[in-house]
Image (tube, grey):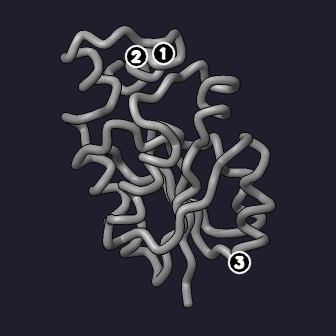
């Protein structure tokens, strides 16, 4: 069985997220989603979520492509997750290209193209939701 893992916040779940999860699952048989906890989002990313961790976890668990949701509590856990869950492929959006190449010593690393016309940052912007500095930087990266 080929195992795939991806990481993210998955707040304000939208079709771009679904596209990522569908394409990630197509790369293997079993998809693990490491979901950023509320504490990790705030303490490390200065990002406040609309939905709580438990709500976001429940949404992800209802998606047919997702087999397991685990908590992401720190940046450094990726190598231990790959080892513990015997992951074959690490997948993340191409806005992170090159940032996780260190995992190539442990598994295949795939950077998938984002769905260009949608992002949580864009949704928040269009709804007039104030953004944290980290959200603003992410929006500049995705739109720049």
Pick the front one: 61 or 103: 61
Place of residue 72 in the rendered image (x, y in percent of width and height, measured from the top left): 65, 48
Real-space CA distance between mark 1 and mark 3, rounded to the nearest whole angstrom? 33 Å
Q: Quarter of the image for the N terminus: give it.
A: bottom right
Q: Secondary structure at mark 1?
A: helix
Residue at image point 41% right, 53% down: 112
- Using the image, determine if residue 84 lies above or below residue 90: below
Pick the front one: 113 or 123: 123
> In the visual, does 79 lie left or right of 26?
right
Q: Secondary structure at mark 3?
A: loop
* Residue 45, quarter of picture: top right
Q: Are marks 1 and 2 in contact (CB under 8 Å)?
A: yes
In the picture of the structure, the residue carrying the numbered disc 3 is 86
In the picture of the structure, the residue carrying the numbered disc 2 is 140
| Disc nearer the start of the sequence (2/3) | 3
Real-space CA distance between mark 2 and mark 3, rounded to the nearest whole angstrom? 35 Å
Residue at image point 43% right, 47% down: 56
| Count of numbered circles in the view | 3
Q: Quarter of the image for the C terminus: give it.
A: top left
Residue at image point 52% right, 70% down: 68
């Amino acid at each position: 069985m080929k195992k795939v893992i991806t990481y993210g916040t998955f707040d304000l779940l939208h079709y771009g997220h679904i596209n990522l999860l569908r394409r990630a699952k197509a790369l293997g048989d079993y998809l693990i989603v490491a979901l950023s906890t509320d504490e990790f989002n705030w303490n490390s990313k200065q990002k406040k979520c609309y939905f709580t961790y438990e709500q976001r976890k429940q949404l992800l668990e209802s998606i047919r492509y997702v087999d397991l949701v685990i908590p992401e509590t720190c940046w450094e856990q990726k190598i231990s997750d790959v080892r513990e869950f015997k992951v074959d492929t690490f997948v993340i959006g191409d806005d992170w290209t090159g940032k996780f190449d260190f995992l190539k010593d442990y598994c295949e690393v795939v950077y998938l193209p984002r769905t260009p016309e949608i992002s949580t940052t864009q949704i928040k912007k269009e709804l007039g939701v104030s953004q944290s500095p980290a959200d603003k930087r992410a929006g500049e990266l995705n739109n720049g």
